[in-house]
Structures are given as structure tokens and as C-alpha cells.
Image: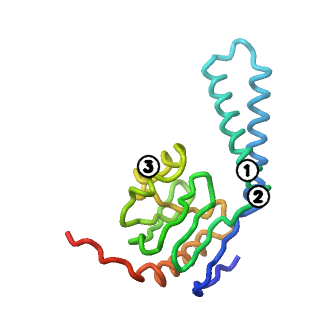
Amino acid sequence: MQAPEPSGQETIIPLSKRKLTWTVVGAGAFVIAAIAILAFASRSIAMYRLVIVGAGAVFFGLVFAFGVKRLRHMPPGLTLTPDALLDNSNGVSIGAVRWTEVTRITVSSISTTRFLVFHVRDPAPYFARGNVLQRMGKRANAAMVGSPVTLASVALDIPFDELHRLVQAYFQKYGTQAAPPAPSA
């Protein structure tokens, strides 16, 4: 997908149906494997291993359910407007971030996954958003990369380099409008 240029209009980047389908298939396979292990486990298997397998079944069951729900109702993964970006790409999505709140955008990576890090004027409101798991994810993001606000292209139907270029173009065009000056030290 060739990313469009910012034009004063909103740009919508859909979720990748292909990636989401493979996630659902993989999670379903893990759940079936975990249930088979639990059902056919001999008494000699240590209890802690059964607990780990059971926890895996629950985790991948949740991933499966979330994925099926997303496939049935696929909202836009990312919407870029002159005012803000609205992330709805995963379970710990950042939600809406106004361009005037962003001070800079950097790239970070964990293993082979690259993602954008949005450094914001006041991170406190972003820590407070979402459910308990989302807030934990944002605290982990901040500890690893210095901001609770991150965005990967993993679930989006756009390559990372195109996403990076497009987001930077929106930030350069709209991020400095009406932005208050940075506090002096």
C-alpha cells in the first residue's frame, strides 16, 4: 500500500485482515494444543507445567476471542487527521494523540519489530487511559523507550517505513501549529 501524503483530510490505514486472520489461526492452534496436553497429560507431569499450559490456553483463548471479534467488526486501525492521530490497532492502543502534544517522534525496536515512539509534553494522561492491562502496557513502554505512547505497523495494512514517513509528514505539517513553546530549563 502506498501511503498518501497529508492533504488536510484524514488518512485512514486499515487493519491487515491477512495478519489478523493468521493471528486467530495461530491462537486457535495453541488453544487446541494446550487443551490436548491438559486432557492427555499423564499424572507424572509436574503440576507447575500444567498450570503454565492452562495459563497459555487462557491467554491464547483471549487472543483468539479478541481476533475473531476484530475480524467480525474491523474498525480502522489508524486514522490521521490535521488535529490528531487515533490508534485502534491493537489491545493496548494509544487512542487519540493531538499533534500539538507531540514533541518529537523517534523509532525504536524490540527484536525485529520496529515501532514509533511519540514523546509527548505530558505523559500522565496517557498512563491513566484504558483498562488495567492497557495501563500496564503503557508503563512498560515508558520504562523501555521513555514514553507510554508507541505505535507499530504489525497489525496495520502498511509497511513500517511507509507508516513512519506518513506519520512524520503529518507531524511536520500539523505538529507545530498552535503548540506552546517548550518550557525553558
Residue hosting label 3: 139
Residue hosting label 1: 67
Question: Mark on residue 73?
Answer: 2
Marks 1 and 3, how far apart in space? 24 Å
**Identity, as a three-letter code, of the amino acid under mark 2:** His
Q: Is residue 43 left or right of residue 163?
A: right
Q: Residue furthest bottom?
A: 7
Q: Is residue 10 left or right of residue 130?
A: right
Which numbered disc, 2 or 3, marks the residue closer to the eye? 2
Residue 144, image x, y percentages: 42, 52
Question: Mark on residue 31?
Answer: none
Q: Residue at x 49, y 53 (%)?
A: 129
**Colour style of the rendered protein structure:** rainbow
Q: Are marks 2 and 1 in contact (CB under 8 Å)?
A: no
**Identity, as a three-letter code, of the amino acid under mark 3:** Arg
**Identity, as a three-letter code, of the amino acid under mark 1:** Gly
Residue 64, image x, y percentages: 74, 44
